[in-house]
Amino acid sequence: MKTIKKKEFKINGLIDKPLYEKLKCSCDKTDMEKMHPIKKCLSCYSKITLNSMPRKSFDIIEKDKKGKKHTRIINEITIDRQELDIVRGWFF
Ligand SMILES: [Zn+2]
């Protein structure tokens, strides 16, 4: 029986000690209105954007020139960072 080996998911642009890890949360957890996202907190924001990054392969549907749909497996992404190394987004 043939086994299909799954390709490992690759993330480009990972760094060891991103600066945002040094940020302290400035939210008042007893008051929703003094917490992120109502109150801007870079520490919470950096965690949200980091967690929104995929960690495993995913499929996208693409159309070719003739308009025919194809499934493409994404095995690799690249991180886009903003100031303090915060993950702004990612692309493939
Ligand atoms: Zn916070």
Image (cartoon, rainbow, N blue to C red):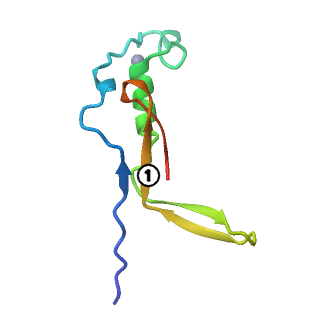
Q: Is residue 88 above or below residue 41?
A: below
Q: Residue furthest left?
A: 16
Q: Is residue 51 left or right of residue 39?
A: left
Q: Which quadrant of the view contains residue 7? A: bottom left
Residue 39 position in % (x across, y down): 51, 12
State left or right for residue 28 relative to residue 71: left
Left or right side of 42 for 69: right
Going by the numbered disc 1, the residue's amino acid type is Ile
Residue 30: where, in percent of width, then height? 42, 10
Q: List the residue tagged with mark 1.
A: 77
- Quadrant location of the N terminus? bottom left
Judge whether 72 appears above or below 13 on screen. Answer: below
With respect to residue 83, does 34 lie above or below? above
| Residue 92 vs residue 33, the one in the foreground | 92
Above or below, comparing residue 28 to residue 83 in the picture: above
In the rendered image, which quarter is residue 6 located in? bottom left
> Which is nearer the eye, 68 or 44?
68
- Residue at 42 percent across and 38 percent down: it is 51
Q: Position of residue 91 (x, y in %)?
A: 50, 48
Which secondary structure, mark 1? strand
Front-most of residues 40 and 30? 40
The answer to whether the beta carbon of the residue marked 1 is less than 8 Å from any atom of ligand 1 is no
Identify which residue is drawn at 42% across, 43% down. Answer: 79
Q: Quadrant of ligand 1?
A: top left
Q: Residue at x 42, y 25 (%)?
A: 83
